[in-house]
């Protein structure tokens, strides 16, 4: 299964945490990053803080995507034991998970809003679970018909 | 496309530069501001700025924005066994 996050995002928590770091704790910029900082006329230190905060948030987004993929795989297998999730990708620009499900060689694309997953994982909202179940039902029905 | 929850580089018009200066926001280079975007709406871009008494939100109105540069990032990929 491919798990990926496409795009970039920095949570306010990570941004604040990195902003408070002393300069010497920041990772050095690559020559390419240094060049971009120069072109954009922004201090290298500011660039390094942004990059580090973005990286911290990215790690959390990957973990969320991985967790959701595991949940989805279990749920799908209960419905269709032959179902296999090939890809789960979080697109941060659109705020949605893009999923490819394979059943008996046939592939079904699925899109699930990130907020549904956040509601499910962060508050355990039963409404979010129902919405997710409904999305899966519709996708599997469409495949059968 | 949403640009909130990211640090972006905003290139400001001359009027925008004057307004930012008036608002007491210091930038390393006039006309270029590297700021964290909290939100965006029809009025403009809401950015966070540190002041003596703590964090503030500042609105940069769209007419003052010449362009915005943000790092798209690559796809971060990992593989997971079922």
Image: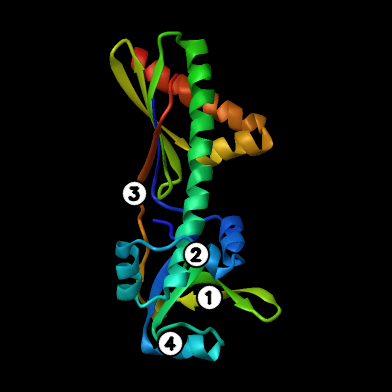
Subunit ID for the residue under disc 4:
B
Indicate whether A48 appears above or below B14.
Answer: above
Q: CA distance from mark 3 to mark 1?
A: 29 Å
Residue depicted at x 43% and y 57%: B2
Subunit ID for the residue under disc 3:
B
Q: Horizontal and vertical percent for residue B71?
A: 36, 60
Q: Is residue A145 visible?
A: no
Same chain letter for marks 4 and 2: no
Given this view, does label 3 or label 4 mark the residue nearer the observer? 3
Relative depth, front residue between A111 and B82:
B82
User: What residue would you read off at disc 1?
Assistant: B59
Q: CA distance from mark 3 to mark 4?
A: 32 Å
Relative depth, front residue between B76 and A21:
A21
Q: Is residue A80 visible?
A: yes
User: Which numbered marker is on residue A49?
Assistant: 2
User: What residue would you read off at disc 3?
Assistant: B74
Q: CA distance from mark 2 to mark 1?
A: 22 Å
> Quick one: label 3 or label 4, which is nearer the N terminus?
4
């Amino acid at each position: 299964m491919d798990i990926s996050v496409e795009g970039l995002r920095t949570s306010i928590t990570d941004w604040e945490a990195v902003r408070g770091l002393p300069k010497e704790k920041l990772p050095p910029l690559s020559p390419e990053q240094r060049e971009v900082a120069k072109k954009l006329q922004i201090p290298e230190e500011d660039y390094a803080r942004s990059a580090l905060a973005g990286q911290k948030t990215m790690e959390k987004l990957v973990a969320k995507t991985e967790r959701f993929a595991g949940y989805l795989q279990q749920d799908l297998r209960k419905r269709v034991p032959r179902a296999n999730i090939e890809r789960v990708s979080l697109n941060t620009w659109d705020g949605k998970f893009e999923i490819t499900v394979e059943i008996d060689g046939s592939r079904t694309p699925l899109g699930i809003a990130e907020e549904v997953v956040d509601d499910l994982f962060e508050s355990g909202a039963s409404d979010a679970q129902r919405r997710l179940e409904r999305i899966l039902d519709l996708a599997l029905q469409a495949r059968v018909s | 496309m949403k640009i909130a929850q990211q640090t972006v580089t905003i290139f400001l018009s001359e009027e925008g530069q004057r307004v930012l200066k008036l608002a007491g926001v210091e930038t390393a280079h006039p006309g270029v501001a590297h700021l964290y975007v909290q939100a965006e709406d029809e009025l403009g871009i809401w950015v966070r700025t540190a002041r003596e008494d703590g964090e503030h939100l500042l609105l940069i109105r769209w007419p003052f924005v010449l362009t915005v540069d943000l790092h798209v990032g690559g796809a971060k990929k990992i593989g997971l066994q079922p």
